[in-house]
Amino acid sequence: MANGGDAFGLAERPDSDCVDSPKDSKHENPPITLSRPTSPQSTCNQGMDAIKVFLHERELWTKFDGVGTEMIITKAGRRMFPGYKVKVTGLNPKTKYILLMDVVPADDHRYKFADNKWSVTGKAEPAMPGRLYVHPDSPAAGAHWSRQLVSFQKLKLTNNHLDPFGHIILNSMHKYQPRLHIVKADENNGFGSKNTAFCTHSFPETAFIAVTSYQNHKITQLKIENNPFAKGFRGSDDMELHRMAKLQGKDYPVVPRTAPRPRVCSSGSPYQGSPGADRSPYPPAHYAAPHHPHLQHGQQAYQGTKRKVDDSCAPEDRQHLYKKPYAGSSPSQPESYYHPSSYAPPPPPPPPPLSGPPPPGLSDSPYRADMGQRQACMFASPEPRLEEPSWSYACPVPPSMTPVESYPPYSPHAPYSSSPRGSRPGGAAHHGSPPLGEPNAHAPYQTQSSEALARRGHHLHGGRLTPPPLRGYPRYPSAALSPPLYPSAALSPPLYHTLEAHGPHGGGVAPEWSSAS
DNA sequence: TCTACCACGTG
DNA sequence: CCACGTGGTAG
């Protein structure tokens, strides 16, 4: 598996820094030098180029990446463990932005974990249109986003292709690359407009293979050691015995787990200490693909509701970056976000400029998705016709997200295709942008300009995205996307439109990023 | 391979 | 208490 680690992340990026606190960031990374400078790239258009994004707890991500990060996906939806949190700088304090994430295929391979390592077993299944997870605070002014870490911890991954909750749908045993998109939400920049300004950042070290159960024990141990919610599993062996006994019904002389050891690493991951070494316990070789995410395809977006606290990252919390146990962050994260006091977010979502009324689109996200969603939920599923019909009307969606959709014609290969691969966007190589190089920051490695998006076809209109006319696209690879399923129109219009809405601008985001071409 | 359930932890 | 997030295990 792991090889992937690097593989996943492979490449590039180990840079350091966490971003969170600027101050510390520097030392954060301990040994890890691996970093390649590369990653940080960002390309943004329209003034968005000044935006910098730093991955919080990068060190932890790098640790996982060194082993080959695995993220559990369940029907109900599972959070990512190292939570995806970023520090964003360079935003205009007064301008409103929508921050959202998507998770795109890192390559078009299917993996298997055997012999204690990951290897490619075949071609990836066709990815469907990806969904977008709009940060619950969106849209919010730059001052808000910059005030503290922006956490996407509540984002959940599922393997249920018919997921009604708005979670991001992934295929098990496939490698993915999470990406962050920052879209200017000003009125003048309606999503639909061609000049929508946005940028995309992706940190190679956050790439992972989706699994229904952990494959690499090292990953399990890292999760247990670092995720507060998994404390019950710390303690290693002893614990295990106890637990097992209990599970089985027996009590067992239980020993109070007095010695819960945080450490357990059973297999010992190499990386711990030195990154370099460990980095690839397994040679990335094989598949190694350079995966790079291709850009994406269209997707649906949901916005988390803004709950109070959301995620969190408190600015403060982050403190220690590297501390190893990341302890606080995830669950514990306080909310920081929401303090009313500060920015009081518009509780009622101010429907941003984008859309007046809140279209379900991004724009209003803040607003509660509830409503929005309920109105229209659409999730586009690839196979819309197959099953999804049912719920279209009401989205069961929890209050948390608003769906937006975009549709993507996605081309599996896109990555490759468009960017020649080299892929890897990441690295510096990427064609598009210059490497950034910010040493400290984690850099985003790739960004696209809005224009690109626009051309791709997506437009968000009022909140929702309109499905791009496909035309522009490369088309699906036949195999993958099953054109059959979706006929050309891949998207079924009806579904998508649900959202519709609104008007002139709204806020939908629909990035389509693919780079492509 | 994936699901359901469990015990345990956080909050 | 509860809800919910964890990984393990059984199936």
Image (cartoon, coloured by chain):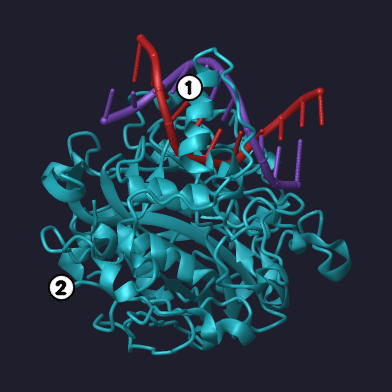
Chain colours: A cyan, B purple, C red
* Residue annotated with mark 1: A390
Q: Secondary structure at mark 1?
A: helix
| Quadrant in which the C terminus of chain A is drawn | bottom left
Amino acid carrying mark 2 in the image: Pro
Q: Secondary structure at mark 2?
A: loop
The chain holding disc 1 is: A
Q: Give the side of residue A185 with respect to residue C6, left or right.
A: right
The residue depicted at 56 percent of the width and 43 percent of the height is A230
Residue A498, position in %: x, y? 52, 39
* Residue annotated with mark 2: A420
* Viewer-closest of A383 and A446: A446
* Viewer-closest of A79 and A263: A263
The chain holding disc 2 is: A
Residue A366, position in %: x, y? 70, 55
Q: Are marks 2 and 1 on the same chain?
A: yes
Disc 2 to disc 1, C-alpha distance = 40 Å
Number of callouts in the render? Answer: 2
Residue A486 location, quadrant: top left
Nearest-to-viewer mark from 2 and 1: 2
* Viewer-closest of A149 and A239: A239
Q: Is residue A464 visible?
A: no
Residue A368, position in %: x, y? 71, 47
